[in-house]
Image (cartoon, helix red, strand yellow):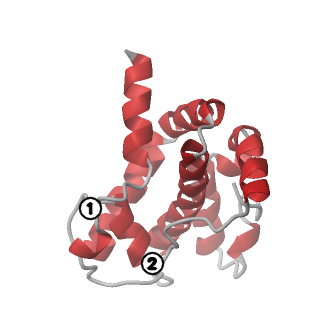
């Protein structure tokens, strides 16, 4: 049963090409530098988005081991992801929930990775270890971001590690 739920979670959490983000026009777009909670959620969403794009590319190349680890990570991050989705749906669209791709579009995030096969192979090979790193604990990342924003730290790239997924 848990495995079936994992497969459903993975398919829902990865961008679905048939969902048109343009169907849901945003109330406002861009980053909310004047709203610390929303800005922190936007940055968490960006990190999640990068992981999702890589996981989608790994799935497309048939990397089942990487997908299993991604699904476990996704389940462990589900409450933080849901909170970000609620906050950003309300911020951008005045309602929720909206498709993940609509939030991606409001943040002007790219819809796919542009990697060579060698880069993709390396990314898929290292994704499981990367997901185990503290920088990909989205709850911790959110708390660290909120603290840094509220203290007026200007360079948020160093919060939670500046490396990608």
Q: Secondary structure at mark 1?
A: loop
Which residue is at a point 72% across and 79% down the rendered structure image? 155
Residue under the point 38% across and 68% down: 103
Secondary structure beneath dot 2 equals loop
Q: Quadrant of residue 86?
A: bottom left
The residue at the point 32 percent across, 73 percent down is 91
Callouts 2 and 1 close, C-beta under 8 Å: no
Query: Which residue appears at 48% of the width and 64% of the height?
Result: 41
Q: Is residue 158 above or below residue 152?
A: above
Specify which label sits upstream in the sequence, 2 or 1.
Answer: 2
Task: Indicate the position of residue 124 as horizontal and vertical percent values.
Answer: 70, 45
- On-image quarter of the N terminus: top left
Graded by Cα atoms within 10 Å as few (under 14), some (14 to 19) or many (20 or more), the crowding at tag 1 reads: some
- How many discs appear? 2
The x, y position of residue 46, in whole percent, is 55, 65
Tag 2: Cα neighbours inside 10 Å, few (<14), some, or many (≥20)? few
Q: Which is nearer the eye, 151 or 8? A: 8
Mark nearer the viewer, 2 or 1: 1
Q: Nearer the viewer, residue 109 or 118?
A: 118
Residue 32 position (above or below residue 113): below
Mark on residue 108?
Answer: none
Report which residue position mark 2 lands on. 35
Seen in the image, is 152 located left or right of residue 36?
right
Q: Quadrant of the C terminus?
A: bottom right
Q: Height in image: 112 above or below 136?
A: below
Q: Which residue is mark 1?
A: 98
The answer to whether residue 99 is visible is yes
Image location (x, y in percent) of residue 35:
45, 78
Give the distance between the C-alpha atoms of the residues marked 2 and 1, in whole angstroms: 20 Å
Q: Quadrant of residue 118?
A: bottom right
Quadrant hosting residue 131: top right
Q: Is residue 24 visible?
A: no
């Amino acid at each position: 049963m848990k495995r079936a739920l994992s497969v459903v979670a993975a398919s829902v959490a990865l961008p679905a090409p048939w969902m048109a983000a343009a169907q849901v026009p945003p109330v406002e777009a861009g980053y909310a530098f004047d709203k610390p909670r929303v800005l922190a959620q936007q940055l968490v969403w960006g990190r999640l988005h990068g992981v999702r794009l890589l996981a989608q590319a790994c799935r497309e190349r048939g990397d089942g081991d990487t997908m299993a680890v991604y699904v476990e990570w996704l389940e462990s991050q589900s409450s933080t992801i849901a909170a970000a989705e609620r906050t950003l749906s309300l911020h951008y669209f005045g309602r929720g929930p909206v498709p993940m791709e609509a939030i991606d579009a409001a943040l002007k995030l790219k819809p796919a990775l542009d990697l060579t096969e060698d880069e993709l192979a390396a990314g898929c090979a290292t994704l499981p270890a990367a997901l185990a790193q503290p920088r990909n604990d989205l709850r911790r990342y959110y708390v660290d971001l909120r603290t840094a924003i509220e203290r007026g730290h200007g360079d948020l790239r160093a919060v939670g590690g500046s490396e990608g997924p």
